[in-house]
Image (cartoon, helix red, strand yellow):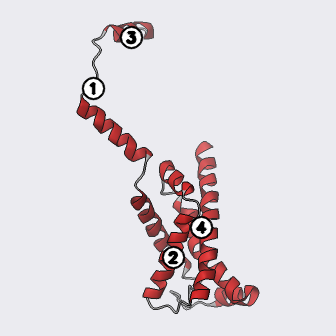
Amino acid sequence: MSNKQDFKDFLRTNKSSPSEDTSKNILNSIRREMIPNKGIVFTKLILVQAFIGAITMIFCPQFSMSLTSNDELYHFFHRTFGHYGCMMVCGSIFIGSGALFSSTILNWAEIRLLKESKLLSYFGLSGLFALSFLFVGAQVYLDVAIAWMIGATLSGSVFFQVSTILKKKIQLS
C-alpha cells in the first residue's frame, strides 16, 4: 500500500472527534508540561541547592560553618577581597554552583519559568539559605548577610544563564 492510498483511506474514514473527557485530559497534560507549577520548580531548586551547597561546604565555609573545618579558602578570600568581598564570593560559590547544576534536572518549560523571574528566584533562594544558616546556629549579621545575598543572587542568575546556554549547545550537537 502506498502513502497516497493510505491518505485516501484516511479521508474516507468516518470523521469523529475524541470524547470530551479525552480532549480535557490531553489539554490538561499539555498544560502541565507547558506551564510548570512554580512551587514544584522552586522545590527542585531548593533540593539541588541543598545537595550542591553541602558539597561546597566541604572546602568553603559559609558564615563560619564548615563540614570539614577546612578554612584555607575562606582565609584566602578574606585576605584578598576583604570581609564583604569574601562574603560575596562565598555566596557566589554556594548558590552559583547549584545554579550551574540545576539546568540538568529542569526541563525547558521550567527553565523558561525561571528565566522569566529574572533575579527573583535566586534572591528568594539566597534569602532562604541565609535564614537556614541562621536557624542551624550560624552567626549571621545583617551587613554580612546582605553582602552574601548580593553575591549569591547575582552569581546564581548568571550561572543559571550560562548553564542553560551549555545545555542548549549540548542538546544541539
* Nearest the eye: 83 or 8: 83
Q: Nearer the viewer, mark 2 or mark 3?
A: 2
Q: Amino acid at mark 1?
A: Pro
Q: Nearer the viewer, residue 99 or 144?
A: 144
Q: Distance from label 1 to label 4 (Cα)?
A: 45 Å
Please say if 155 is above or below 69: above
Contact? badges 2 and 1 (CB < 8 Å)? no
> Residue 110: x percent and y percent?
48, 53
Pointer 4: what residue? 156
Query: Quick one: label 1, few (<14), some, or many (20+) residues within 10 Å?
Result: few
Report the mark closest to the observer, 2 or 1: 2
Dot 1 or dot 4: first in sequence order is: 1
Relative placement, left or right, of 17 versus 106 is: left
The numbered dot on residue 18 is 1
Q: Amino acid at mark 3?
A: Asp
Q: Nearer the viewer, mark 1 or mark 3?
A: 1
Q: Is residue 72 above or below residue 127?
A: below
Q: How far from the left and from the top, in percent, is residue 142? A: 57, 87
Q: Quick one: SS at disc 4? A: helix
How packed mark 3 is, by other alpha carbons closer than 10 Å (few <14, some 14-19, many 20 or more), is few
Disc 2 secondary structure class: helix
Residue type (three-letter) at the residue carrying disc 2:
Gly
Residue 127 got which mark?
Answer: 2
Residue 6 - label: 3
Q: CA distance from mark 4 to mark 2?
A: 12 Å
